[in-house]
Image: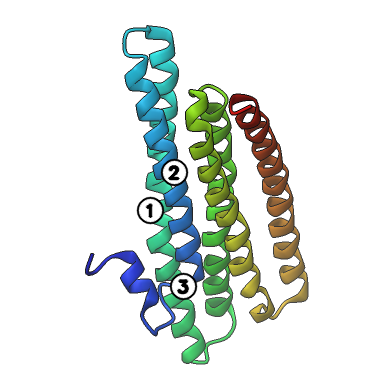
Amino acid sequence: MPGSFLDDLRRPRPDPGGGSAAAHGALLGMALAEKIVLLEQKRTLRRVSEFELWEGLRMEASRLRDLFTWLRTEDMLVYQQLAEVLRDGVDGLRLQGALVEAIQCPLGIMRGSWEALELIEAAGMRCRPLLVADVLVACEFLGAALFSAHHIARANLPLMRDPSTRERWLAELTAELDRGRERLQRVRTALEVRHAAGSG
């Protein structure tokens, strides 16, 4: 489709770049998760309590989809701002502010991925067995978004002039990655066990 995000991504220019691609990967995972939630919600239309559970998951999926859509564009904008500051040779508070924004955006993708994995687990443990493989695919997209966003955020750290500020951001990014990695492993393992049981 002309003018699509993938068309923009493959162009020989810096933006959109890795951060936006990470958010796009998370969006692929959320689209698949939302499909599963809608299929299950349709199936439970006449069972009120089950329907309401899936409706809650649908609303959360919609919120996360909006978040990742915004972050996909926001990452491109903050990168453009940082590139302009670097091109102009600006230092001091303006550079610091641009760097913080360039780190906070992929950090938001990491945190969003962490939240989305909770939804993935809830859907994957309740959906029909034949859908668990699709939930696993969504899980892997979100895991990739988590790690990819971490790479992008860390790439900006060497530009920070103040060592203590740089170390503080490194510690925060590392903590978020560790938290996300732990949840990813837990969710992936739970889904793999259920998938093996369903196809055994």
Q: Would you call the spot at circle 3 few (<14 residues within 10 Å), some (14-19), or many (20 or more)? A: some
* Residue that numbered label 1 is attached to: 69
* Residue that numbered label 2 is attached to: 30
Callouts 1 and 2 close, C-beta under 8 Å: no
| Image quadrant where one finds the C terminus | top right
Secondary structure under the numbered disc 1 in the rendered image = helix
Dot 1 amino acid type: Thr
Residue nearer the viewer, 174 or 181: 181
Residue nearer the viewer, 191 or 113: 191
Disc 3/disc 2 C-alpha distance (Å)? 20 Å
Q: Nearer the viewer, mark 1 or mark 2?
A: 2
> Which of marks 2 and 1 precedes in the sequence?
2
Looking at the picture, how far across and down is residue 183, in whole percent?
A: 68, 40
Give the residue drawn at x 58%, y 32%: 121
Dot 3 amino acid type: Gly
Picture layout, residue 36 above or below residue 89: above
**Is 54 placed left or right of 189 in the picture?**
left
- Residue farthest to the front, as pictured: 200
* Residue that numbered label 3 is attached to: 17
Dot 2 amino acid type: Met
Give the residue drawn at x 52%, y 92%: 89
Secondary structure under the numbered disc 2 in the rendered image = helix
Question: Residue 77 sits in which quadrant?
Answer: bottom left
Picture layout, residue 30 above or below residue 127: below
Question: Residue 60 sits in which quadrant?
Answer: top left
Picture layout, residue 167 above or below residue 144: below
